[in-house]
């Protein structure tokens, strides 16, 4: 939610064109693991894994926020 709000505030209506989220799954059918990846303007940023899509997306968002902070971009 923080990351989405940040993009909306920073880019306005074009926010959805500036960042993308992809999710994939793998592993045995009875024990799927999900991996989410955030890209900003075509550059791969955060990656996160989880036992469901939501957990993977949240982990990828937190990783993205951490990487942006290293670059001096603070996500409130």
Image (cartoon, rainbow, N blue to C red):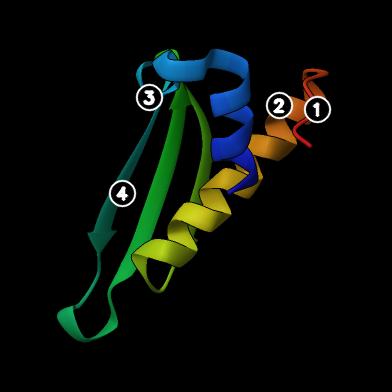
The residue that appears at 24% across and 63% down in the rendered structure is 26
Quick one: SS at disc 4? strand
Which residue is labeled 4 in the image? 23
The answer to whether 7 is drawn above or below residue 59 in the figure is above
Disc 1 or 3, which lies upstream in sequence?
3
The answer to whether 70 is drawn above or below residue 2 in the figure is above
Determine the CA span between mark 3 and mark 2: 18 Å
Mark on residue 16? 3
Give the quarter of the image for residue 76.
top right
Disc 3 or 2, which lies upstream in sequence?
3
Q: Residue furthest bottom?
A: 30
The answer to whether 58 is drawn above or below residue 4 in the figure is below
Disc 1 or 4, which lies upstream in sequence?
4
The residue that appears at 44% across and 26% down in the rendered structure is 39
Mark on residue 68? 2
Determine the CA span between mark 1 and mark 3: 19 Å
The percent coordinates of residue 46 (x first, y second) are 55, 38
Which residue is labeled 1 in the image? 74
Q: Is residue 67 left or right of residue 45?
A: right
Disc 2 or 1, which lies upstream in sequence?
2
Determine the CA span between mark 2 and mark 1: 7 Å
The percent coordinates of residue 25 (x first, y second) are 25, 60
């Amino acid at each position: 939610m923080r990351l989405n709000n940040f993009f909306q505030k920073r880019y306005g209506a074009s926010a959805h064109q500036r960042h993308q989220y992809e999710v994939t799954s793998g592993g045995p059918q009875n024990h799927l693991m999900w991996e989410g990846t955030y890209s900003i303007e075509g550059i791969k940023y955060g990656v996160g894994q989880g036992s469901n899509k939501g957990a993977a997306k949240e982990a990828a968002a937190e990783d993205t926020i951490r990487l942006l902070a290293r670059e001096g971009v603070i996500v409130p």
